[in-house]
Image: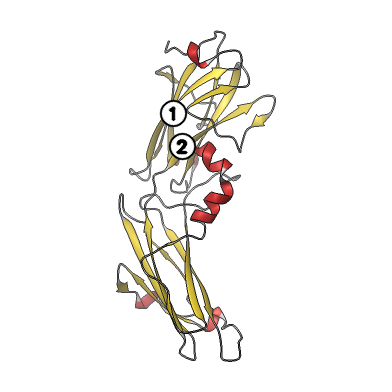
Amino acid sequence: MLRTLHRNFFLYLATFLFASIPLGVTHAQIGGSVNLLYEAESYTPDFYRGRSLPSANVPIRVFVDANLVNANGSRVSPSNISYTWSVGGRVMQNISGVGKNYLVLAGPPLFGASIVGVEVTSPSGQSASRTVRIGAEEPILALYENSPLTGISLHNALSETDTLSDRKTTVVAEPYFFSKPTSRGDIKYTWRINNTLAAANPGTPNATTISSTSTNGLLVSVSAENTTNALQKVIRSWSLFFASASASQFTKE
């Protein structure tokens, strides 16, 4: 899944970075339009260049891109526009006002969505509005190879059945869209190799080193659980082989 995400980066960015899901068309006088952009305060690795998506209960930042034009053709400054926010159809007077072109709100509930709307009005009375539905996404767990020869393959997540470059290598798990951890212990990792508990690398709980002298593949499983948010837990498994082995030789030992 993550390999597809990396290979289709620009498509992903176009789909998710600017695509809020409208519940209706923008209503505006001539010369006025508005868009809503949002980003979650969720964890993504440093090398990730897409948008942070919201999983359950992760706070969201919503920004307004308003384009209102004065009679002389000049664009109205965002700081001079009045913003009226609504959440779930309820007008939020305490966060509305002139120049208030963003808000931070609690993330959507599990299997649910947050409905956010804004009406923008210029000093001359020009107006436009937009409403978006922001649904909760499922967190993602990706696995990367950290080869002693080439380092970590940051833009090449391992697929569920994959081949490693070396018979002894380190694999690193990255949890996408979890709440941002405030300490290393916020996310608990449990590793298994061929259904047997395996130790994480010292000081790096999201990594383990695997090796094999046989031609058989290994079943590598890891669970990531947010100790501060019980709704965020992912378990994934990978069938991993080594360069001289083929997928037909995979066995669970």
Which amino acid, mark 2? Leu
Q: Nearer the viewer, residue 81 or 126?
A: 126
Above or below residue 60? Residue 169 is above
Q: In the figure, is residue 100 to the left or right of 23?
A: right
Q: Earlier in the sequence, mark 2 or mark 1?
A: 2
Residue 111 on image: x %, y %: 30, 50
Question: What residue lies at 52% left-to-right and 42% top-to-bottom?
Answer: 5
**CA distance separating discs 2 and 1:** 9 Å
Residue on which the image places disc 1: 222
Colour scheme in use: secondary structure
Q: Which mark is residue 121?
A: none
Residue 11 on image: x %, y %: 55, 50
Residue on which the image places disc 2: 141
Above or below residue 59? Residue 247 is above
Above or below residue 90? Residue 82 is below
Q: Are marks 2 and 1 in contact (CB under 8 Å)?
A: yes
Which amino acid, mark 1? Val
Q: Which quadrant of the figure has residue 252?
A: top left
Residue 150 on image: x %, y %: 69, 28
> Is residue 193 among what the camera can see?
yes
Q: Nearer the viewer, residue 173 or 201?
A: 173
> Is residue 101 among what the camera can see?
no
Residue 14 on image: x %, y %: 54, 55
